[in-house]
Amino acid sequence: MLKQILSKLPRKSSKSADNREHGGHHNAYYSNVSGGGSRSSDFGTGKSGNLSVSSFAVSNPTADVGWKSADLKQNGNHMLSSYEAMPAFKDVPTSERQKLFVKKLNLCCMIFDFTDPTKNLKEKEIKRQTLLELVEYVTSANGKFSDVVLQEIVKMVSANLFRSFNPQPRENKVIEGFDLEEEEPSMDPAWPHLQIVYEFLLRFIASPETDAKLAKRYVDQPFILKLLDLFDSEDPREREYLKTILHRIYGKFMVHRPFIRKAINNIFFRFIFETEKHNGIAELLEILGSIINGFALPLKEEHKVFLVRALIPLHKPKCLAMYHQQLSYCITQFVEKDCKLADTAIRGLLKYWPITNSSKEVMFLNELEEVLEATQPPEFQRCMMPLFRQIARCMNSLHFQVAERALFLWNNDHIENLIIQNRKVILPIIFPALEKNARNHWNQAVHSLTLNVRKIFNDLDPELFKECLLKFQEDESKEDEAEAKRENTWKRLEELAEKKAFHSEATVGTSESMANGSSG
């Protein structure tokens, strides 16, 4: 009877509103179809898509994999009435449990509309309980998952997770990133089911019964790309699960490792150079921090290129505050892995150093201290001149937090030792900034810190300090002379301009008198 009913249902989607009303993709649940589509019906978009069996992908990225509850009602109640709970695994013989597992996976491919909490309460609860049973089954599974089971698992996961997002417009928000941190994150109304699906996927990937060699046919590159697309979710709970799952996939499927790194790289490129909008940059960087930590030495050229072309340019976007802690960790991991990269990292920071954003500047100084702590003398000497020219500018900043943070570098023993060893180069660069702060800086804390740094150099090398002081005084005298010359030059120019203007007025007056005389 059920097969006769199903045979009458439409098998292809239609773009017309009439066909959307009459079922869309009702065969998506019972037929052997991919679950790699978008669950836009959960958000009420009401679009239908085209499912592909072979690649677990959807030709229309905004397609709907499941059914809307309204669609089901249009076809009568026979579909919903058939949505009944199945027996528990413990109630069937061991030999039948795998078949029951597949049936339960198929049952959970149905997608409900969670934007209306009053719809399909019974069916939603049946699905939730079934998902919990699936999680328990995967956790306690004995024996490798077969090819058929792997296919059905990926189909169910794809049907539930892969969907299009309807993000709130961010153009009206402050893009700086600091105000965005204060905003309430957007929570997915379908999370009660999504969370269990994510837990199921996590247990499946982590299960010793999941054979990576067999599963890689289904947990393939298109699947991973769709998983990465989900990192743009506004729901932080979802991003947290995705972070853990992707990290487990990276660890288990060695064949996919280069592809995952490249795919993340591409997300960063698009974020840096095109959109500057993505919700999951921090989570992706957390994954990379762990990956970088496991890099073998010597580092591959590919990894060094990734540092230069992707990680360092991530300092450019305005919303750096949203992911700076994770980015700083990744940069520091590279320097700790290969100390020769310290020069590259520091020059990269200097390249993207913010000029008008004081909050960002404080973050750069925090990161700089972490990088310098892992820097050895040879690399420090290669970049110390441009580095301390920038630090000197920070010391003179009128924003007291910037100036204070720059002067705090002397509180780090490793950095202070590097500076002391190279004081003959560094002190002449920063001495003018120290003198100007000691004389004129408005903030008392900055003034005190400046005096402490001056004292360190004076006590350590009085002769060098005296030389720098004399040089500063000479330069100051020259600047005063140059300023006086500029003022005299401007005065002469003003006098000449006045004379020329007076002469022009006199000439015009004489011409007018002659013209009036001749006309008389």
Image (spheres, grey):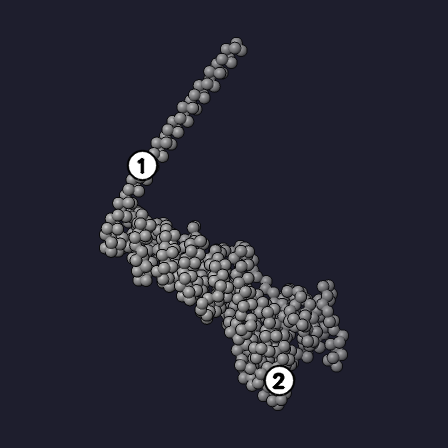
Q: Splitting the image into 4 quarters, where does residue 384 fall? A: bottom left
* Quadrant of the drawing holding the N terminus: bottom right
Placement of 297 over or under 372, stated as above or below: below
Which residue is more in the foreground, 247 or 360? Answer: 247
Which residue is more in the foreground, 311 or 158? Answer: 311
User: Is 127 on the left-hand or right-hand side of 180?
Assistant: right
Q: Tell me which residue sits at (48%, 55%) in the image.
A: 316
Q: Amino acid at mark 2?
A: Gln
Placement of 427 over or under 502, stated as above or below: below
State the image coordinates of residue 408 (x, y, percent, origin top left): 33, 58
The number of numbered discs placed on residues in the rendered structure image is: 2
Q: Splitting the image into 4 quarters, where does residue 67 fall? A: bottom right
- Which one is in front in this view, the residue at disc 2 or the one at disc 1? 1
Q: Amino acid at mark 1?
A: Glu
Residue labelled with disc 2: 98
User: Is 515 on the left-hand or right-hand side of 386?
Assistant: right
Residue labelled with disc 1: 481
As drawn, the residue found furthest toward the top would be 520
